[in-house]
């Protein structure tokens, strides 16, 4: 997903999305260890999405503190 998609979400929605992505990453790693995973690049995509979500959460929290 693009960062602009995440910026349209609220902080609560982003935190929920973060938890969902963490669960997905856990499951992907488990499947990768078993040798069951077909698309190895999905692990990388999920990691990048997690970082994007955390970045947008930080941006929004900083803007709230500044009063914007």
Image (tube, grey):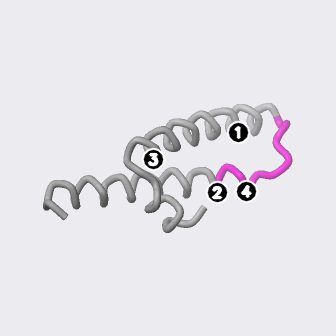
Q: CA distance from mark 4 to mark 1?
A: 10 Å
For the point 56% across and 51% down, the residue is 47
Label 4 sits on residue: 41
Q: Quadrant of the N terminus?
A: bottom right
Label 1 sits on residue: 28
Report the front residue among 30 and 49.
49
Instruction: Indicate the position of residue 63 as horizontal and vertical percent values.
Output: 22, 61
The kind of secondary structure the magenta stretch mainly shows is loop
Label 3 SS:
helix
Q: Locate residue 24 relative to residue 40 in the image: left or right.
A: left
Report the front residue among 54 and 37.
54
Label 2 SS:
helix
Which region is colored magenta? 35-44
Instruction: Indicate the position of residue 7 as horizontal and vertical percent values.
Output: 44, 62
Q: Which mark is residue 45?
A: 2
Label 1 SS:
helix
Report the front residue among 42 and 14.
14
| Circle 4 residues within 10 Å: few <14, some 14–19, many ≥20 | few
Q: CA distance from mark 2 to mark 4?
A: 6 Å
Q: Earlier in the sequence, mark 3 or mark 4?
A: 3
Q: Which mark is residue 55?
A: none
């Amino acid at each position: 997903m693009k960062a602009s998609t995440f910026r349209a979400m609220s902080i609560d929605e982003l935190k929920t999305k973060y938890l969902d992505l963490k669960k997905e990453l856990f499951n992907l790693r488990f499947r990768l260890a078993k040798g069951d995973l077909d698309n190895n690049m999905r692990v990388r995509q999920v990691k990048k999405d997690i970082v994007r979500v955390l970045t947008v959460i930080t941006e929004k929290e900083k803007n709230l503190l500044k009063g914007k």
